[in-house]
């Protein structure tokens, strides 16, 4: 699996794709899979990251999600955002189709 | 067009049922993802960044209007209202839900199409010349042998688990529009001094991490022996190709490491054995049967020019420009080949909406003997349009934003889906194509620049063919940020060449300026009627580097 977090990463979260439709999901503090990055559990420190990923790996998750992995998160003022362009795009949708993906859902809800 | 026989129908129908069962068992937990993943890939289902992606094969790039209407229907019912035409003449849907894909495939099978072997380490969709049977100077319609290869390679039990994927392209014309030298096997249909038709075979071309031009392995394989020869190539590769390292597993690496002479010897030794068995000799009657599906349409006897067309060109300057850029001479007097650009200024290369697909299908049914072609440059073609219908066709295309007059020009860019969709990508490709087309939106400027092929890939796998772009752009990732590397001098035609990297990469903010610098360097130093590629071949990389990296 490709590496989506660096050794020096401080803040991390776990993401995966939902089995039924491939939707991007995030592991929440209560071990659910949520569709928005805002609901993701964000850990501080490498050991906490490993522990977070371990929570995502139990076999029963295989019924719901695919290929969970850790990715780096940055703290910007008071809020968090994914560190890489890849994860920013996964959290929002294609930058060339703002009418599609989570960005469009968010717009409809607001 | 080829029509499925009872065996084709049965095979595809059984495969859909089988996949439906596999999906059900995956969802119920009977199958693990590790077990399921190779099964879904064999049916063209990938997992991308935001959703699953389904890749549907369009054999040798030929579609009927009914088949194209089905793509529109699938886009609307199972996806988000659009499809993406790829550099392998396939169509991809970006948002299907896993549990709906079996229904989708069942509907697709009703128009004799499928997604089998569009992924995995097997022989993929055979690609060909989009102007087949419409262009003058062709030895033979390349779709006949492409169809025979399709039948031979579909579910071929010996070649289901090759070291790596395998791509075959065929052209029947000296002007190569199928990029045959960039394929694992490239076939050129030839006629010898005796008037017999046979095949020149190139082996070991490809792009990706290690771009290589194919080596000519045989000058003339007689018609009846083609499958025996292809089987020999495949068998040598299957036995001796590397399986220890996926980056070195394509046949191009084997040809490179084994050497051309030894590779030829291995293939010919295997060929002699297979040929002697006569197992794969294609009977002339079978060739005739398949040829009959590709019989020439019943063209009318028409004059070579059309007063209606000439008058329309005089009245409408935009139409005249479109004819000049997008319409190509047909072999039959009174007809023309129409290229439909899927590269509107600021648009997504290769994307077409459901409504656009239906509009093209209607035009094909009414004006082009029910045929549409898909090009590896991500455009569509109406192959047989009467000259006096050109204006009507143009107006209908224009109404659907399908009449951009930019074929082969700087805004007719190839771009892979890139980091907007693709799980493998390192950088975005589509926004760059959009910015470049907007920067050079002025068509007069594009005509002045002339033929210039920009090809953009979002990672080293090179789905966007950057190695063979006159200007190639490769997206790279540096610590989560996108950068873009430029290469110059690539070409995918009969004079195929691999581009050379100019130097250090550019940022997202500076790459379009850098492309403009390359273009103005060319227009400053070009001589006479030189195209970009001619100038590059005369002056080399240095003048471009000097301007690009001037302090």
Image: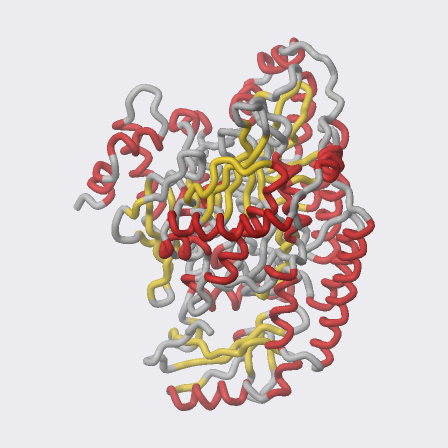
Q: Where is residue B158 in the image (x, y as percent from the top left)?
A: 61, 61
The quadrant where residue B532 appears:
top left
Residue sitting at x 82%, y 50%: B6
Q: In this view, does A72 lie to the left or right of B108?
A: left
Give the answer, above or below, for where B247 lies relative to B403: below
Q: Residue furthest right?
A: B6
B537 to B212, vertically: above or below: above
Q: Residue at x 64, y 26 (%)?
A: B394
Position of the N terminus of chain B, as image quadrant, is top right
Q: Position of residue A65 (x, y in %)?
A: 61, 77
Above or below B235: residue B20? below
Query: In percent of the image, x 52 and y 66: which residue is there?
Result: A90
Q: Can residue B510 be seen in this view?
A: yes
From the viewer's perspective, tell me whether residue B158 is left or right of residue B180: right
What colour scheme governs how the chains and residues are painted in the rendered image of this protein? secondary structure
Query: B281 or B143, which is in the foreground?
Result: B281
In the image, B379 versus A12, the foreground residue is B379
Residue appearing at x 79%, y 65% in the figure: B17
What x and y, as percent, mark residue B419?
48, 59
Q: Residue furthest front?
A: B276
The correct choice, above or below, for B139 with respect to A97 in the image is above
Q: Can residue B398 be seen in this view?
A: no
Foreground of the two, B238 or B458: B238
**For residue B382, what is the image quadrant?**
top right
Q: Position of residue B67 (x, y in %)?
A: 74, 44
Residue placed most toward the observer, B31 or A57: B31
How many numbered circles does the render carry? 0
């Amino acid at each position: 699996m490709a590496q989506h977090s660096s050794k020096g990463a401080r803040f991390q979260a776990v993401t995966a794709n939902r089995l039924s439709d491939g939707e991007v999901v995030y592991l929440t503090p209560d071990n659910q899979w949520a569709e928005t990055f805002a609901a993701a559990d964000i850990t501080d420190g490498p050991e906490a990251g490993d522990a977070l990923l371990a929570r995502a790996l139990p076999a029963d998750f295989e019924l719901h999600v695919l290929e969970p992995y850790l990715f780096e998160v940055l703290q910007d003022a008071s809020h968090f955002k994914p560190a890489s362009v890849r994860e920013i795009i996964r959290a929002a949708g294609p930058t060339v189709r703002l009418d599609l993906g989570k960005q469009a859902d968010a717009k409809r809800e607001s | 067009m080829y029509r499925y026989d009872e065996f084709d129908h049965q095979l595809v129908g059984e495969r859909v049922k089988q996949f439906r069962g596999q999906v059900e068992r995956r969802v119920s937990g009977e199958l693990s993802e590790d077990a399921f993943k190779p099964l879904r890939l064999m049916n063209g289902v990938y997992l991308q960044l935001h959703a699953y992606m389904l890749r549907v094969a369009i054999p040798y790039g030929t579609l009927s209007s009914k088949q194209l209407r089905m793509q529109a229907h699938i886009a609307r019912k199972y996806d988000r209202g659009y499809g993406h035409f790829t550099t392998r003449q396939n169509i991809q849907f970006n948002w299907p839900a896993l549990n709906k894909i079996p229904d989708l495939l069942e509907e697709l099978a009703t128009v004799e199409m499928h997604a089998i072997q569009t992924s995995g380490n097997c022989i993929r969709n055979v690609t060909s010349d989009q102007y087949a049977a419409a262009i003058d100077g062709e030895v033979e319609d390349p779709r006949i042998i492409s169809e025979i290869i399709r039948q031979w390679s579909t579910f071929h039990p010996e070649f289901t688990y090759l070291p790596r994927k395998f791509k075959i392209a065929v052209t029947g014309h000296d002007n190569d529009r199928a990029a045959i030298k960039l394929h694992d096997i490239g076939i050129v249909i030839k006629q010898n001094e005796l008037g017999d038709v046979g095949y020149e075979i190139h082996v070991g071309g490809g792009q990706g991490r290690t771009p290589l031009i194919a080596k000519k392995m045989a000058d003339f394989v007689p018609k009846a022996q083609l499958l025996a020869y292809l089987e020999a190539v495949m068998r040598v590769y299957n036995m001796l190709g590397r399986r220890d390292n996926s980056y070195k597993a394509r046949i191009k690496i084997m040809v490179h490491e084994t050497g051309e002479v030894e590779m030829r010897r291995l293939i010919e030794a295997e060929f002699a054995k297979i040929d002697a068995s006569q197992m794969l000799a294609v009977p002339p009657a079978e060739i005739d049967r398949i040829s009959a599906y590709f019989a020439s349409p019943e063209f009318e006897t028409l004059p070579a020019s059309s007063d209606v067309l000439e008058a329309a060109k005089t009245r409408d300057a935009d139409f005249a420009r479109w004819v000049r850029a997008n319409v190509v001479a047909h072999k039959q007097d009174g007809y023309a080949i129409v290229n439909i650009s899927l590269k509107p200024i600021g648009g997504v290369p290769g994307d077409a909406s459901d409504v656009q697909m239906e509009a093209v299908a209607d035009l094909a049914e009414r004006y082009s003997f029910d045929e549409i072609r898909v090009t590896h440059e991500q455009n569509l073609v109406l192959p047989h349009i009467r000259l006096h219908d050109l204006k009507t066709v143009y107006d209908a295309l224009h109404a659907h934003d399908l009449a951009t007059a930019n074929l082969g020009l700087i805004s007719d860019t190839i771009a892979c889906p890139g980091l907007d969709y693709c799980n493998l990508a390192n950088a975005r490709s589509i926004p760059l194509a959009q910015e470049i087309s907007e920067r050079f939106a002025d068509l007069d400027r594009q005509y002045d620049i002339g033929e210039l092929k920009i090809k953009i890939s979002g990672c080293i796998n090179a789905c966007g063919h950057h190695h063979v772009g006159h200007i190639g752009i490769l997206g790279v990732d540096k610590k989560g940020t996108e950068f873009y590397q430029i290469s110059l001098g690539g070409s995918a035609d009969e004079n195929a060449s691999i581009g050379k990297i100019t130097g250090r990469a550019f940022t997202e903010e500076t790459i379009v300026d850098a492309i403009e610098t390359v273009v103005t360097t060319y227009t400053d130093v070009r001589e006479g009627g030189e195209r970009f590629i001619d100038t590059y071949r005369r002056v080399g990389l240095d003048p471009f580097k000097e301007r690009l990296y001037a302090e």
